Image (cartoon, grey):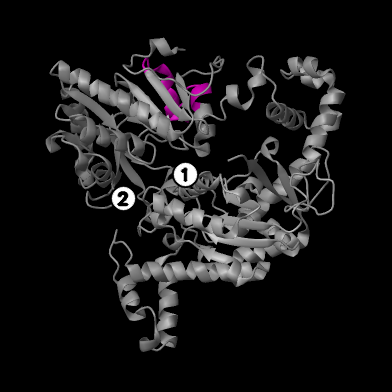
Amino acid sequence: MKNTLEIKSDISYKSAGKFEDTRFEKIHNEIFKNSIDGSLIVAQEIAQLIRNKQEKNKICVLGLATGSSPIKVYEELVRMHKEEGLSFANVTTFNLDEYYPMTKENSKSYHYFMHQHLFNHIDINPENINIPDGTVAIEELNQYCVDYEMRIKNAGGLDFQLLGIGRTGHVGFNEPGSHINSGTRIITLDHITRVDASSDFNGIDNVPKRAITMGVSTIMRSKRIVLMAWGQNKGEIIKRTIQGNISSDIPATFLQNHTNATFVLDQFAASELTRFKTPWLVGECIWTQELKSKAIVWLCQKTEQSILKLTDRDYNNNGMSDLLAQEGSAYDLNINMFNVLQHTITGWPGGKPNTDDSHRPERATPAKKRIILFSPHPDDDVISMGGTFSKLIKQGHDVHVVYQTSGNIAVTDDEALKFAEVSNDFIAKEKSVLDFESIIHFLNNKKENQIDSLEVRKLKGLIRRRESYAATRYIGLKDENTHFLDLPFYETGQIKKNPLGNVDVAIVAAIIAKIKPHQVFAAGDLADPHGTHEVCLNAIFAAMKQLKSELYMKDCWLWLYRGAWHEWDLHEIDMAVPLSPDEVLLKRHAILYHQSQKDRVMFQGNDSREFWVRAEDRNKNTAKLYDDLGLAEYEAIEAFKRFDY
C-alpha cells in the first residue's frame, strides 16, 4: 500500500480531517468535505501537468471521463483557461467510452457531453480530440478499436487518466467479467448500468444496450490515474474496491495493482470505509456521543441483541474495550443509550404543549407553531413525511408546504398529451390560457433531444401542481397554505439544471421572511439522481444564513427529513415520529394522488420500487430497528435530524 509521498503527482492532496489508520485499504485515497473541493484539486493537478509539459515542449496526453463526477473538474479547467491563460494547445485527449450505436449530435452522446462541458470552451486543436465513434459500422468495429489503441500508443501513452466508477464497479464501461488484459472493444452494458442511465434517457427502454470502451489494460498502462467518486450511492462499491480482493467481478479492483493511482472521494462516498464506518475496529477512538450511539447500535445489530442485553464481553470482543473502560460497565452504557433513543420518540413533532420538554426532541412552546415544510419536488413532502405532515395539521399548527420546483421535467410526454387532449376537447379555444392544439402538435411531432416548448413545460408543471393540491387537501391543509416557488434554476427544460443563483435564494428567503417559522422541515436526502434536492437544500441554507440576524430566526429550528432515497441511520436520528396503521394508509393515499409519478417513474434512481412502496418499506424498517433494539413496537416511523444552521 502506498502513502501520499509515494504518489507521483505534482499536487499535494490534503484531505478533510486528521490522519486515520488505513490498514484495511489497498488503494491510496483522499477524502474531501464535498465534491467541489475534491474537483478543484484534481483540476489543479491536470493544469500543472499541462504546464509542465508545455515547459518541455511536450504533448500532454489526457484520458478523460464523462458522467456527473468530472463536471466540476471541467468547469474549473475552463475557468483557468479563460481567467488564468491555461492553454490546451499541447493537449491530446482520448475519451474512455461512448454508447453504441450513438450519433455525435445526440445530446445523450459522450461526444456532445465533452464538447458541451469542455472542448467548446478551450483552445484545444479539434484534431487532437479522440472520442470513440458510436456510428462505426458493426463489421468495422474490431479494426476501429485496434486503431484507437494504436492512436493512444502513437501519442506516447496516457500521461493522466481521469476515471469515475459505476455501481457495478465498472471503470469506463468495463463491466463485471472484464479481463485485466482487455483492450478497447464493444461491450454489452450491465442492467444496473442501464438502470442508472435511464433517467438521462427518459426510461431504460431508451438506453443503448452496448458501448465502446477502453479496456482495463489500456487504463492500467496510464502513467497516472485519478478516480473520483461522490455521494452516498457510491459508498458500498468504493469500500469493496478499496478494501476487497482483486476480482473481475469488480473491475475497479484491478487499480490496486497500479503504482500511481489515487481515489478522490467526498465524505459520503468514503462513508462505508472501515475507518469511517466502524473506526473502533481500526484503533482507539475519541468517543463522542454520536460515535457511542453509532457503535452501540452496530453492536446490537451484529450480536442480534437488544440494547439492555449487551454484556461486557460483547463490548470487549468487538473492539470497544476502551469505551467500556471509560464508561465503567455495559450496564451504564446500555441504560444511557436506551434513554438517548427513547427520548427521540415523540408523537408530537411540533412539541407537546404544557409538558416538561427537557427529554423531548421539540420544544413545548409556543404550543401552536408556524411551520414551513419545504419540498424540492411536488411530492417529496408526502413521500418523506406524509404522516408527520398530517400530525402537525391535526395538532393545530400553522403549517405551510412550499414546493421549490415545478417538477415538470418528471412528467412524461404521454401523460402531458393525455391532459392536453382532454383539455382541448373540453375547453373552448378562446377561453383557454394554453393553446392545447399547439401543445398536442408539438408532442406528437417532438424530435429526439428536443427541449419542451414553454407551453408544454407549463402544462407539465400544472399537472404536478394540481396533483400537489389534491394530496395536501387530502392531508388536511388549506389551499392558501400551499405555495409554489418554481425556482428559476430548475426551469431549463432539460435534465441538466442551472447553478443555484441569487434569485433562487432571494425567493426562498422571501417565503421564510413572510411566514416567520418556528420550525422548518427540509429534504436532507441528497441521493436523488440529478441533484435537485442538494440545490434546493443549499438554497434554504443560504436563505436562512441571510436571515439569521432577524429576531424571529432565533426561535427557528431546522429539521431534515429523508425517505425518498435513503433513511437516516439510527444513530443520526434526533426525532422519530411513530405512525399508526391508519396513518400509514393515509400517507400512501396522499402519495398516490401524484398520479403522473406512478407506474412510470422517470427518475427513480437505483430503486425500482414505486415511491409509495419504498417510503412505506423504509418507515416500517425504521420501526423494526427500534423494536429490535428493545424499544416500543410501532407500525412505522418517520425520522428527522436537527441541523444547526
Amino acid type at mark 2: Lys
- Upstream in the sequence, badge 1 or badge 2? 2
Residue pictured at 64% horizontal, 57% vertical: 371
Q: Which residue is mark 1?
A: 192
Look at the image and tell me whether residue 562 can be seen.
no
**Residue 175 sits in quarter:** top left
Q: Please state if 185 lies on the left or on the right of 466 as rendered.
A: left
Q: Dot 2: few (<14), some (14–19), or many (≥20) neighbours within 10 Å?
A: some
Q: Nearer the viewer, mark 1 or mark 2?
A: 2
Q: Is residue 242 magenta?
A: yes
State the image coordinates of residue 375 (x, y, percent, origin top left): 55, 56
Does residue 90 appear left or right of residue 197 in this picture? left
> Which kind of residue does numbered mark 1 sit on?
Ile
Residue linked to disc 2: 108
Q: How many marks?
A: 2
Residue 353: in magenta span:
no
Q: CA distance from mark 1 to mark 2?
A: 18 Å
Of residues 445 and 187, the one nearer the viewer is 445
Q: Is residue 193 left or right of residue 145?
A: right
223 sits left or right of 125 in the view: right
SS for dot 2: loop
Q: Is residue 526 above or below residue 93?
A: below
Depth order, front residue of 512/118: 512
* Coordinates of residue 360 in the picture (x, y in percent): 78, 44
The quarter of the rendered structure image containing the C terminus is: top right
| Quarter of the figure with residue 18 | top right
In the depicted structure, whether residue 13 falls above or below residue 402: above
Give residue 164's position: percent from left, percent from top.
Answer: 39, 33
> How crowded is the residue under tag 1: few (<14 C-alpha within 10 Å), some, or many (20+)?
few
Q: Position of residue 527 (x, y in %)?
A: 52, 44
The local secondary structure at tag 1 comes to: helix
The disc at residue 83 is: none
